[in-house]
Image: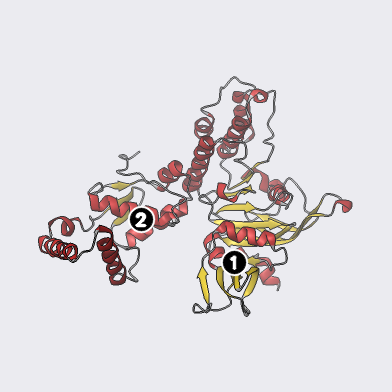
Amino acid sequence: MTGAAIEANGLGMTYGRKRGWALRDCSFRLPAGRICALVGPNGAGKSTLLALAAGLLRPTEGTVRVLGSTDRAEIRPRVAYVAQDKPLYPQLTVADTLWAGRELNPATWDADAADRIAAPLPRDAKVRTLSGGQRTRLALALALAKRPGLMLLDEPMADLDPLARHQLMGLLMAEAAEHSTTIVMSSHILTELEGACDYLLLVDGGRVRLGGESEDVVAAHALVTGQVRDLAPHTVIESRTTGRQLTALIRPDGPVDAAAWDVAEPSLEELLLAHLRSPDAPPLLTPSAHAREAVAAA
Amino acid sequence: MAESAAVEFRIDRRSGVATYLQIVQQTKQALRLGVLEPGDRLPTAREVVEATAINPNTVLKAYRELEREGLVEARRGLGTFVRRTLGSAAVTTDAPLREELVAWTLRARAAGLDRDDVSALFTAVLDSTFKGDPHT
C-alpha cells in the first residue's frame, strides 16, 4: 500500500476566539500520487487547510501529517505551496526570481523545468509589471522546479485565460505523470478541475463533507425519480417533490428497486451542489480517505 | 527521446463518454482504419496529459484496458506498443458476410423501409446481439 501525502486528525484552526472556527474536526487521508480537487464555497476553509498542510500555520487543535512527518521544518522543503495571491517579490525581475528559487532550493532545483514553464515570460521584466496570469506562470515555475513531493495550489487557474489554463494544467499533469507528484488544487469552480483530478475533497463550513476517489464518491450515490414514496433504507441527501413525482439524490443502502425508480448516476457537479444545498447530509469518506490513526484509535 | 508516437487523442469533455473510454475507442478506431499498425508506439502518459490536461491515471487505465484485450503491450522503459490490428481483414475482405448484408438491405428497401428505418433496425439487432459485451 502506498503512503499518505496528507493525513489530518481532528484538525482545527481558529484565527482568534471571536472569529469562530475556520476549520473544525477535520479527519481525512489523501493517498500519495493522487491529483485532488479541493472544492467548496467561498470561506469554506480551503485556504486554511492548504496553509496548514504547507506547514505555514500551526493548527489550533489536532494534527496534520504531511509525507509522513508532522515536523513543520521537515515538511516545508518537500512541499510547494502557491497561495491564492501568488506572493512574489514585486521588485525582482523574472530572472532574479528564478535565480532566488535555485539558491533557496539547491538540492532539488530543476532548472530545465523552470525555464520550460517560464519561457514565455520576459526575463528582464520586474514582477510588479507582470499580469496576473504571468505571475501565476512564474509562481508555478518556482513550485514545479522545486520538485516537491506534494504541491498545494490555492485557486491556481483563477487568473489564467483558457489557453494558458489548458497549457499549464497540461504541464502540471505531465509533471505528475513523470514524478508521481501528489497535487492538491482548490477551486470553487469544479468544471475547471474535473478532467484533471482523480480525488475529491469537499470542504464546507470548516468540515470535510466528501472525500475519496472521484469515481467511488460518484458511484456511492444515485439520482432517482419516481412516484412519491418512502426511500428508506437509503440515505436521502436531497429530495424534491413536484405533483406525484419525487426526485432525490440518495446514498443507496443495498440495491435500489429498479421497478419503482428510474435510477441514474449523478454528475460530480450535481453531487456537489446537492451536498452544498443540504448542509445536514452526513459526511462520506471512502475507505482510502479515512485517517488511519483515527481508525486505529477507534 | 524515442521515435514520435503514431497517433494523438482528442478528449471531448462534453460527450458523456468516460475519458479513458474515449482513449480506448480512438485507439481501436485507429487500428480498424490502419492508422495504427503492429509495432507502432502509443504516446506516453506524459505526452497525452501534456496535450490534453487530463489526469495521468486516466491514460494508464485506458492502456491497461487495451493491454487486457491483447491489442497493445507495455515494454518497460520503452513505452506501449501495438501488438495486432483490429477486425479490418474481416470488415473489408470477408465477401460472403458483406454480400448477405447487401442482399438483406435490398430486401429491406423493397419491403418499404427507408434509410433511417433500416439503420434503426440494424442498430437494435446489434445492441441486443452484443448486449453485455464490454465497450462495443
Report in which chain the residue with disc 2 lies.
B
Residue A268, visible in the rendered structure: yes
Q: Nearer the viewer, mark 1 or mark 2?
A: 2
Q: Is residue A274 left or right of residue A205?
A: left
Residue type, mark 1 in image:
Thr
B18 in relation to B36, above or below: below
* Residue assigned mark 1: A286
Out of A74 and B26, give the one closest to the viewer: B26
Labels 1 and 2 touching (C-beta < 8 A) = no
Location of residue B132 in the rendering, given as x and y in whole percent from the top left corner: 35, 71
Location of residue A39 in the rendering, given as x and y in whole percent from the top left corner: 64, 53
A139 in relation to B85, above or below: above
Location of residue A234 in the rendering, given as x and y in whole percent from the top left corner: 61, 76
Residue type, mark 2 in image:
Val
Residue at the image position 13 percent from the left and 64 percent from the top: B103
Residue at the image position 52 percent from the left and 30 percent from the top: A115
A162 in relation to A150, above or below: above
Q: Is residue A91 left or right of residue A199?
A: right
Q: Quadrant of the C terminus of chain B?
A: bottom left
Check the image and name the residue furthest to the front. B112
* Residue assigned mark 2: B24
Mark 2: give few (<14), some (14-19) or many (20+) Cα within 10 Å.
Answer: some
Report in which chain the residue with disc 1 lies.
A
Check the image and name the residue furthest to the right. A18
**What distance separates the C-alpha of mark 1 from that of mark 2?**
27 Å
Residue at the image position 53 percent from the left and 35 percent from the top: A164
Location of residue A51 in the rendering, given as x and y in whole percent from the top left corner: 71, 47
